Image (spheres, rainbow, N blue to C red):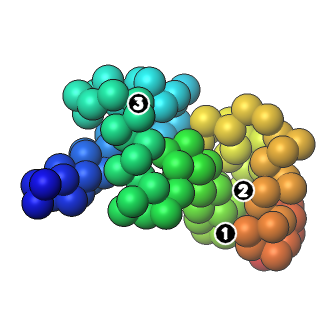
Amino acid sequence: DRRAPAAENRTTRAAKDFIEHHLSESLTVGRVAEAVGVSERTLQAAFQAQLGTSPMAYVRAMRLDRVRTELADAPAGDRLTVTDAALRWGITHLGRFAGEYRRRFGESPSETLRG
């Protein structure tokens, strides 16, 4: 079916838009799929085909990027903490977060904050 790739593109675009606007909230594959109007299986397949990743891996990556930006842009003397930034972007497992952050960016969140 020649329409399948276009449908996957629309699904992926709509899901990415929804995720972007709700990144700080609790997100599940089911919630994203419902918002986009597709099944969880369709959403998973669309992300795998278009982005080579799962929807939740995409969410985690986006959250890490947002936290990194916030930490890197914090003015000297600001009272921002790594925990505050992580929680603001929907990250609740702080131990796992620190490890994922280091793997992705090659430094700890506190190193980014100290600049």
- Mark yes or no: residue 32 visible: no
Mark with earlier residue (2, 1): 1
- Report whether 53 appears left or right of 79: left
Q: Quadrant of residue 107?
A: bottom right
Mark 2 = which residue? 78
Q: Quadrant of residue 15?
A: top left
Point 79% across, 35% down: residue: 93
- Residue type at mark 3 is Glu
Mark with earlier residue (3, 1): 3
Could you tell me which secondary element the residue under label 3 belongs to? helix
Q: Is residue 102 above or below residue 43?
A: below
- Residue type at mark 2 is Asp
* Circle nearer the viewer, 2 or 1: 1
* Circle nearer the viewer, 3 or 1: 3
Q: Is residue 106 above or below residue 28?
A: below
Question: Distance from label 2 to label 3 (Cα)?
Answer: 41 Å
- Report whether 50 appears left or right of 104: left
Mark seen at residue 72: 1
**Image quadrant containing the N terminus:** bottom left
Mark 3 = which residue? 40
Q: Residues within 10 Å of mark 2 (few under 14, many from 20)?
A: few
* Residue 14, image x, y percentages: 25, 45
* Residue 58, image x, y percentages: 52, 52
